[in-house]
Image: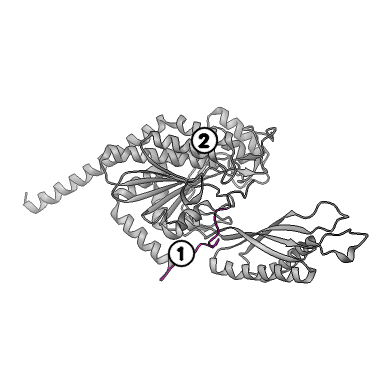
Amino acid sequence: MPINKRSILISILMTVSSFTMANQQQDDLLSWMDTRYQHTASMAKQIWDFAELGYLEQKSSQLLQDKLAAEGFVIETGVAGIPTAFTATYGSKGTVIGILAEFDALPGLNQAAEPFRSPVEGKHAAHGCGHNLFGAGSVSAAIAVKKWLKDSGQDGVIRLYGTPAEEGGSGKVYMVREGLFDDVDFAIHWHPGSNNNAEARSSLANRSAKFRFHGISTHASGAPHKGRSALDGVEAFNHMVNLMREHVPQETRIHYVITKGGVAPNVVPDFAEVFYYIRHPNAETLKEIWARVEDAAKGAAMGTGTQVNREIIHGNHSLLPVEALSKAAHKHLTRVGGIEYNAEEQAFAEKIYQTLDKPSAKLGSEKEIRPYRMRRSGGSTDVGDVSMVVPTVRISTASYVPGTSSHSWQSAAAAGMSIGFKGAHNASKVMALMAIELYQNAQLRADAKAEFERRRGDNFKYVPLLGDRQPPLEYRK
């Protein structure tokens, strides 16, 4: 056999052998992760029980830190001026991959892990967005990647980011602003859902603020002419913003709630407060709409003889998708597969399904992987800011009963039992495989970074939408 053909054959055989060995290592890791399912489930259940609100997640944060410290991760806690924020790092050289972990609950939602409406007495928050699953699954993924790095001898750094207060607190934004992602090459995150997908998803940029009106209190009947109602200011402001809805881009979303409006009808309120969210896919357009909202607040104050000030509460950029990463994640999600219910879970799911109003998916679809696509979500997330500074990839697994909406008692119920735990376990396996490919696949790294820079555009400069305010550590108190 001529030497050149022999060399080619040897090269092919070596490539096949290397590929086979790499696949076997990954199969072995996935099998090992299956033996640790209960570790993931236990973490998820504990955080579900804690149900701690944003920036108040002391027990949840400490639990995850302790698990990672026991596995040899170096913990840095209280980062970015946030007591419950932390990083956990393993490795010292090579490609740096960050995995995001959330763990805050939702206020005003309460539900036992039952397939019927069952509030828990005395409990005032719940994991209706599955962040207990998010945190547990991400920690399990980081531990698995650490094991693979150690066993394989591969250079690489894995870092778990404990990110508080995603629900309206923008915890990740402060971490980005403080430079905690400056050395990260790629970031991986996931979110519980009612189906399995690795869509290249964008989202809506978002800014929120509390507008506070100050008036003059007086007897509403005895001396009404001496009063200036702060509630009038709020109502005039809301009316003006509602008129704006006809004259903003159609993708805009505006919602508000009056948080304080007075106490007694016969007392002209000297203070009233309204809490606004404004959303749009494009951050620059959002800023233009926001300026009009602030002008409306000033006009309402002028017209009602009151004074107004505002406090920015949070601001998130939209998610920046990177299709090269999403397509790779879809491949790994397909390999891991969907969720298989046992008999108990099937009975639970059937009861939940009967409570859903026009569910968007059928029972049984939890077993399926949705086709790859690119789309825009109607929600907002502080992961958007991470995605503006680091190429970022997301997945979602069927952690709720198909057709379930987030922020519902049905999602909270599933997040507290094995349907949710299985979703977190599958997500951890997909994230681990995604990290391993990023360590090994130089072409994927190059393609993803090039696409990332192209999508951000020339001369991009990251500017947080919440400005220079400090973390609102008491916004949930």
Q: Position of residue 18 (x, y in %)?
A: 23, 43
Please state which amino acid type lies under the numbered disc 2.
Ala
Magenta range is: 457-471
Coloring scheme used: one colour
Whether the magenta-drawn stretch holds residue 107 is answered as no
Q: Is disc 2 placed on a helix, strand or loop?
A: helix
Residue at point 41%, 40% (across, down): 141
CA distance separating discs 1 and 2? 34 Å
Q: Is residue 421 left or right of residue 407?
A: left
Q: Please name the residue that numbered disc 1 is placed on.
A: 462
Q: Position of residue 393 (x, y in %)?
A: 43, 52
Q: Is disc 1 placed on a helix, strand or loop?
A: loop
Identify the mark nearer the N-term, 1 or 2: 2
Please state which amino acid type lies under the numbered disc 1.
Tyr
Whether the magenta-drawn stretch holds residue 467 is answered as yes
* Residue placed most toward the observer, 388 or 461: 461
- The part of the image, by quadrant, that contains residue 124 is top right
